[in-house]
Amino acid sequence: MSETTSSITAASRSEARGWITALYFATFLVLGMSTASMGPTLPGLAGQVQVRLSQVSILFSTRASGYLVGALWSGRLYDRRSGHPIMAVALLGAAVMMALVPVMPSLWMLALVMLLLGGAESFLDVGANTLLVWLHREKVGPFMSALHFFFGLGAFLAPVIIAQVVLLTGRYSWAYWLLALCLLPVSAALLRPASPTSPHRDSNGRVDAPVHWPLLLLYVLLFLTFVGPEGAYGGWIYTYAVNMHLADAQMAAYLTAAYWGSFTLSRLASIPLAARFSPRTLLIADLVGCLVSMGMLSVWNQSVPVVWLATILFGASIASVFPAAISYVGEKMAITGLVTSMFFVGACLGGILLPLVIGQFFELVGPQAVPWILFFCMIFSVGIFAAITVMQNRRIHPVG
């Protein structure tokens, strides 16, 4: 009887973990949709608040600022409170902000909405990554890869949904309202299951794990140096290809699509790979692929076949660095809300700073600066990863 009861209990726990994991996947699907929604509607938003396109681009900065503030604050909250209600409130807040976007009459009001939307998105990002590690612990690898695949899938679907809604209704506002509605069922569903708890939670219900700050700062720099290139390449490859006379406007658009397509397919392929190979092995292979692709593009920058090959290889390599790095860190140090939030602070800073740096050098040096900057950035990533390996091999004891 006891064996039967134990089997039933184990099966129930496994089913509960499966349901909670599915909710995190759904969260990242709608998070990807939310994140990718602004780009295709930017001209419409400029017309809505009656400003030039160059002025409305400030929305990217305000959204990123909200994300950065949210990332700094959310980690501690997840360490102290039950995670699912926090994520549910963040989803509800994101839905409200998405619904308000098409009705804001001025640029400053729209910027405020984007600031709050960015903050809500960072709460979801930090929460899902942290709680997934707490839920699956040492077996988190393939689940982490799947989580980030669903983000990419959502980012791919959002422009398609927006285009179809605009085609049917003639108004982009309905697209925002539809995407906002997609957030609500996930928010409600997260209130039902109990939240995963940290293995480092103390008797008072708070997470109490020692932090090796020098090692953590190296990880933050690692996230900064590879997340920046991820977004920067996708944002600049179109302009680079056109200005280098490697493609016309149409082919440059296809080149951009090839990058994000290889990125999404790679995240899908990384799910079974993460179940077979260690995060360290995947991380090394990804970093080598990034170095090789940017090295090729830096040396043979006048070759059309090389730009296509390098773009596809870079997209496939950079795509799984983030989930592999999260899984790798989980093997080496305690993953708390604070630790995860620091990772996303680094990622956010990289996403803000590197595109700006490329923009400055693009005007000063020319478009050939793009692959060289990304190549040196990936060299820094490899160097930081080597420093992390050396520090871990020395078995330095964590300090509080």
Image: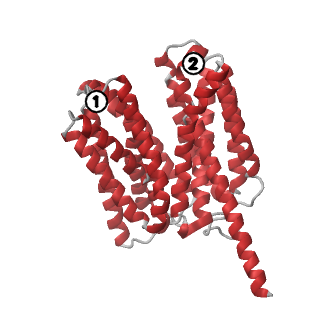
Image x and y of residue 144, in percent: 53, 58
Of the two numbered discs 2 and 1 in the rendering, the one whose residue sits closer to the viewer = 2
Q: Residue furthest right?
A: 1
Whole-percent x, y for residue 84 in the image = 70, 54
- Seen as rendered, the residue at the extreme top is 50
Identify the amino acid type marked 2.
Gly
Kindly state the secondary structure of the residue where label 2 is placed.
helix
Q: Is residue 333 above or below residue 28?
A: below
**Residue, x 34% and y 27% (percent of image)?**
239
Q: Earlier in the sequence, mark 2 or mark 1?
A: 2
Q: Is residue 187 above or below residue 214?
A: above
Number of numbered labels in the structure image? 2
Task: Please indicate whether residue 383 sits to the left or right of residue 175 in the image.
Answer: left
Q: Mark 2 points at which residue?
A: 44
Numbered mark located on residue 361 in the image: 1
The amino acid type, in three-letter code, at marker 1 is Phe
Secondary-structure class at tag 1: helix
Q: Where is 233 relative to 142, above or below?
A: above
Q: Can residue 41 be seen in this view?
A: yes
Q: Is residue 339 visible?
A: no
Q: CB atoms at circles 2 and 1 under 8 Å apart?
A: no
Q: Left or right: 220 with respect to 365?
A: right
- Residue 20: percent from the left, percent from the top? 68, 59
Q: Which mark is residue 273?
A: none
Q: How crowded is mark 1: few (under 14 residues within 10 Å), some or many (20 or more)?
A: some
Identity of the residue drawn at 56% across and 32% down: 160
State whether residue 281 is above or below residue 226.
Answer: below
